[in-house]
Amino acid sequence: MSSDCESSDSAGRTGQLMVGLGLGLLYGLALQKSGVTNHDVVLGTLRLQQMTLAKVMLAAVVVGSVGVYGLRQAGLLELQIGSASIGGNVLGGLMFGAGLAMLGYCPGTVVGAAGEARLDALIAGVPGMMIGSALYALVHRDVVALKQMGCMGERTFWQLLGVNPWAVLVPLSVLAIGVLWMFELMGL
């Protein structure tokens, strides 16, 4: 009987991997179609000359957060909240920012650009992510204390505030939509 359980468990994992692969391909296609896999678009956003990347990411955050919490409220999704810390966010932000500053791509856009066979992404971006990941794996144990500085535990922002998630999501979504509208009015 355990072989049947293992077999169905394996089939379930394979199905999850296939769903993940399909969603990843759709995400990559959306990035490519929106133009954010173009190095000049990313740099234009960093230079505040055009906001294509900011608009795509802001729209994704609004749709994703409302969608996730809507599915959660409907009982179709269970969230696994990880431990948050100020040190971990600062460290992650510095690493992300350094990679973005050096290459002009974020992890998602560099993979999309590599899929378009852009040489800067293929020669520097993807290998750079792999080298950076390997280096982080080597020093991970040494930075654990830094990552745990300002540890807030497994709580969300609204749990820290003691309010319903929608009391934060709705105003922030309205604000984000207002920012998107402002970018459009400004021609960015």
Image: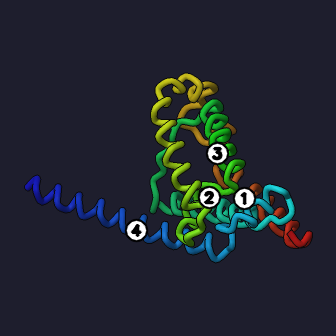
Residue at mark 4 = 19
Secondary structure beneath disc 4? helix
Residue at mark 3 = 96
Disc 2/disc 1 C-alpha distance (Å): 10 Å
Question: Residue 18, percent across and down?
Answer: 36, 68
Residue at position x 76%, y 67% in the image: 52
Q: Amino acid at mark 3?
A: Phe
Residues tagged 2 and 3 counted as in contact (Cβ below 8 A): no
Q: Nearer the viewer, residue 88 or 130?
A: 130
Secondary structure beneath disc 2? helix
Question: Residue 23, percent across and down?
Answer: 48, 69
Q: Quadrant of the N terminus?
A: bottom left
Residue at mark 2 = 65
Disc 4/disc 3 C-alpha distance (Å): 27 Å
Among the two numbered marks 4 and 3 on one chain, the one whose residue lies closer to the N terminus: 4
- For marks 1 and 3, give the one nearer the viewer: 3
Question: Residue 165, percent across and down?
Answer: 64, 51
Q: Quadrant of the C terminus?
A: bottom right
Residues tagged 4 and 3 counted as in contact (Cβ below 8 A): no
Disc 2/disc 4 C-alpha distance (Å): 20 Å
Among the two numbered marks 1 and 4 on one chain, the one whose residue lies closer to the N terminus: 4
Question: Residue 177, percent across and down?
Answer: 78, 65
- Residue 158 versus residue 180 in the image, above or below: above
Q: Within 10 angstroms of label 2, few (less than 14), some, or many (20 or more) residues? A: some
Residue at mark 1 = 170
Q: Amino acid at mark 2?
A: Ser
Residue at position x 63%, y 30% in the image: 87
Residue at position x 36%, y 63% in the image: 17
Q: Quadrant of residue 95?
A: top right
Q: Within 10 angstroms of label 3, few (less than 14), some, or many (20 or more) residues? A: some
Considering every residue shown, the one lying at the far bottom of the view is: 33
Disc 1/disc 4 C-alpha distance (Å): 29 Å
